[in-house]
């Protein structure tokens, strides 16, 4: 189980936006991601600079606000 990191509203919306983008297979370049989400392993970057929700990020979303 992932530690429930407290997220502010913007960080929470970012995780939701990445999940929606993945479901729609939309590009993620326009989604702004904070260093905090990256450093806590909730979001990753691919070699082309695209952002994606990690398994930890998905688990955190499933924990709810």
Image (cartoon, rainbow, N blue to C red):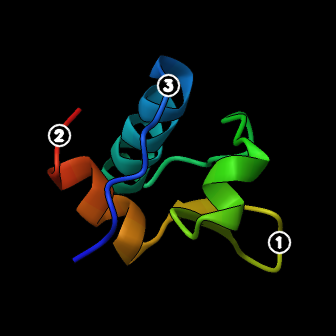
Earlier-in-chain disc, 2 versus 3? 3
Q: Which residue is mark 1?
A: 48
Q: How far across and how far down the image is residue 28, in percent?
A: 63, 47
Which mark is in front, 2 or 1? Answer: 2
Q: How far is disc 1 from disc 3 in space, using C-alphas?
A: 27 Å
Depicted 13 relative to depicted 23: above or below? above
Query: Crowding at label 1, few (<14), some or many (≥20) Cα neighbours within 10 Å?
Result: few
Viewer-closest of 20 and 63: 63
Element type where label 1 sits in the image: loop
The answer to whether 65 appears left or right of 9 in the picture is left
Q: How far is disc 2 from disc 3 in space, using C-alphas?
A: 13 Å
Q: How far across and how far down the image is residue 56, in percent?
A: 38, 71
**Residue at image location 69% in from the left, 50% down from the top:** 36
Extreme-right residue of the structure: 48
Q: In the figure, residue 65 lies in which quadrant?
A: top left
Q: Which residue is mark 3?
A: 8
Query: Crowding at label 2, few (<14), some or many (≥20) Cα neighbours within 10 Å?
Result: few
Q: Which residue is mark 2?
A: 64
Q: How far is disc 2 from disc 1 in space, using C-alphas?
A: 30 Å
Depicted 49 relative to depicted 8: above or below? below
Q: How far across and how far down the image is residue 44, in percent?
A: 63, 69
Element type where label 3 sits in the image: loop
């Amino acid at each position: 189980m992932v530690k429930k990191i407290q997220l502010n509203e913007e960080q929470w919306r970012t995780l939701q936006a990445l999940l929606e983008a993945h479901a729609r297979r939309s590009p993620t370049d326009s989604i702004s991601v904070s260093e905090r989400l990256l450093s806590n392993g909730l979001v990753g970057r691919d070699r082309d600079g695209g952002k994606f929700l990690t398994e930890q990020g998905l688990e955190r979303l499933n924990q709810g606000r």
